[in-house]
Structure formats: C-alpha cells, structure tokens
Image (spheres, coloured by chain):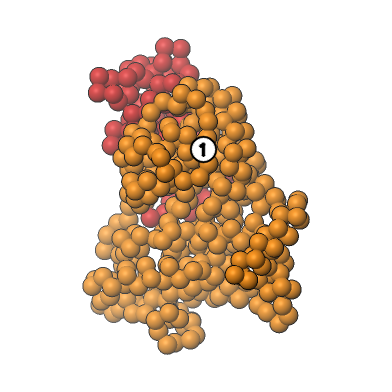
Chain colours: A orange, B red
Amino acid sequence: MAKLTLAAVTLTACGGCDVQIMRALLHPDIMESFEIVYWPFAVEETRLPEKVDVALVNGVVRTEEDLEKLREVRKAARRLIVVGSCAGFSGIAGQADYWPTDASLRAVYGKPPENTVKVLRRVFSPADLVPVDYIVSRCPPLVPSIVSALRAVLGKTSIETVESTVCSQCPRRIKEIKEIHFKKGMPRDADPETCFLSQGYLCMGSVTLVGCGAPCTRFGLPCFGCSGPSHEVALRRDSDIVIALARKIAVLAGLDPVEGAETVKKKLLETYGPRRFYVFTMGSEVIRTKPNAYAVEAAAETRLNPELCEKMIETRKKYLRR
Amino acid sequence: MPVKPPTIIIDYDRCKKCLNCIRACTAFEGVYEKGEDGYPKVVRPEYCVECLICHLVCPSNAITHKNYRETLVLDLSGLPIERYKHIV
C-alpha cells in the first residue's frame, strides 16, 4: 500500500503539541503508513505541497500569516485534524484576547514596533474558521488520541468520540455541600478522597469533556478544563460554563436548580472573577456566541478599565528588569 | 403527555453517587430513589414529566432518556454541533 502523505502545521503555539505529534508518529504502524512531507520541526522542506492526504494543525490563529497558512493547508489537505486545546477551543493561547493587542505589544517592546507581523485584532481557533475532520483536544493532546485519529484516517479502526465529563473518571467521592463558601487558590489542605467541589474549591471537571482519565484530580490538582466544554455546555444555547457549574453546585448544596444556581453563580463570579472559568476557552466561538457569554465579559474587563493594562505593563517591566 | 413513558437509563459506570438527580427531580413523587448500594435507581419512570433537569445537574452525564419529546434548545448556527461529532 502506498504511504499517505502527512503535513504538520504549527500556527501560533508553544510547541508542546509538536512533541506529542512526534511521539504519536513513533508508533510502528503509523510510521509505516505515513510519509511526512512538511513539518518545520522535523523536515527540511519549507513549502507546503499542493496536495496532502492528512494535515495535523496545532496552535491558534493570531497573525495574518497564520490565517493564510490555515487557508492554504485546508485547501491542500484531504483530511484535516486539529491537535490540541488551542486549535480546538483556543486554549491557553486564547488568553491573549484578555489584553488589547497594543497593550501586549507595549508590554513586550516598550512601544508598538514597526515592520512587524500583522497581528489580528483577536485570537481565533482554527476549528472556528475552517471545517475540520477531527478534533484531538486537551493540553497537551494525549498520544493515544492522536494515534486513534490517525488510524481512523487510515480506515483501520473506528473512532470512539467522548460524551461524558471528567467526573466520570475521577476517583474522588462527591459529598453533599453543607455551606456554600468558595476558597481561592490551590487546594493544599484538601482531603484526597473527597470531591473538590464538596470541599469548596473550584474544579471544572463536571463541565469538561473526558478522555484524559482525570490525572489532575488524582494528583491533587483541580480540573482546569483543558479538554473543552462538555456537550451540555456547548450544544445548549442557554447554557454556559459558569451557569452549568453553578447549577451542579447548587443542587449538591440542596438548593433549587434554577433559583439557587443564580445565587451560586453570583458567588462564583464574585470569588474568582469571570476569567477563571475560561482558562482554555476564552477565544472559542462556541462559548463566545452564547447569549449570556461570560467569556466576552471577561475579555471586556481590560477594555473597560485601561488602568488594568497600565498595571500589567508596569508589573511586566519590573519582572523584566530583575 | 406522551403515550409511552420514557425509558430512563442510568450508566452506572459513570455514576458518582452524588444523588443530584434525586434532589433535583421535579416529579411529585420523584422518579429516582436511593438504592441499597448507594446508587440512584429509577423507581417510578411513569411519573417522569420530561423536564430533563436530571441531565443538567448530573456531573457525569450518566442519565439518558429514551422516547422523550425532543425540545432541546440547540445552537442553530450548526457549527458547534457538527464539530462535536468528531471530538476524540
């Protein structure tokens, strides 16, 4: 059988996905069936061929160059798989939207530099801009998931898509909440066998897609939601991450799922601020197009108070001087 | 009201025994009840009013209703729905 051609394209990203892609490509059966024709990290070829069979895209669209590259790769590829939280739901890189672009540039360069790359006015995730075949979410994306997506392209195995939340694989026991009180910061003094929500810490497990095996909660870290919003949050127009989470907490505390959720939601937003809930989904169109999108509210925070930007620039200057 | 009562299935592999479904059920008698093993059981499916609040309060999406009226409020842009079929 002839080998399928594979191109890996990195847009604005940290490089972690490339490492995971490399680890996935080291599987013997994958290595035998794919031929890498373009991958700046590993292959010398500098131009994307006109036709490829499979393209793996990671990172967000931040500059105009990224946008052109994404269009090019969609045109060329027969199957497009986006890898990583950034490419699926804008991920950590989507946090760039929190600061206005000129403030970010000023923080790094002092004044906005001339003759630089053209930065777009906001961050986009590739899955919002072009049709994609598979999303391998999570940060970093798991090697078995990338492998299973590649095998599905080969037609060897069927693919198992996820539909449950992180809670279904988390070993912690959920207990009733006696008093609604949220604690900030990392759960250092938390009981290792009880659910974080029951202990008053914020854990996004109940609104996040599963597939990871809940490694964070097993080792004492609450879930930050790297896998993207669950089906309930993403598909229902009236739902949002904060609303869905508040509803679950309210019922755990024995309150009404509608009225009680409002109180819990207010308390959550007061304690953590809206930005905390969109660590991995701030730039995602799935979340932003909701009627009551707190992600937009979070992003508007810096636009409404320019002092916040000035403060950030000052802090950064201090940090750079050290 | 539908002629047939909906079939309610709880996936016990996913269930976390939080009993949110029992607390949130809006039927007068309550559709669910706590079993001896601590898991919720579907006791009175004929009383179900199909509000599907149990789906929303379940932290692990363990509950499924079959033959219920389909009034899910979906995002009409279609884009997220199409995408959600293929998440690995």
Q: How many circles with numbers are drawn on the protein?
A: 1
Residue A16 at x, y percent in the picture: 43, 68
Q: Give the residue at x 46% y 53%.
A: A226
The outermost residue toward the front is: A322
- In the image, taking residue A146 as reference, residue A282 lies left or right, namely right
Q: Is residue A26 visible?
A: yes
Depth order, front residue of A257/A197: A197
- In the image, taking residue A170 as reference, residue A9 lies left or right, namely right
When asked about the image quadrant of residue A81, the answer is bottom left
Q: Give the residue at x 42% y 12%.
A: B29
Residue A42, relative to residue A29: is it above or below?
Answer: below
Q: Give the residue at x 64% y 59%.
A: A97
Residue A254 at x, y percent in the picture: 48, 21
- In the image, taking residue B17 as reference, residue B74 lies left or right, namely right
The amino acid marked with disc number 1 is Lys
Helix, strand or loop at mark 1: loop
Q: Is residue B52 visible?
A: no
Depth order, front residue of A285/A174: A174
Depth order, front residue of B70/A57: A57
Residue A289, relative to residue A17: is it above or below?
Answer: above
Crowd around label 1: few <14 · some 14–19 · many ≥20 (10 Å): few
Residue A228, relative to residue B13: is it above or below?
Answer: below
Residue B84, relative to residue A256: is it above or below?
Answer: below
Residue A272 at x, y percent in the picture: 58, 42
Residue A320 at x, y percent in the picture: 61, 70
Quadrant of the rendering where the C terminus of chain B is positioned? bottom left
Disc 1: host chain: A
Residue beneath disc 1:
A183
Q: Give the residue at x 47% y 49%.
A: A224
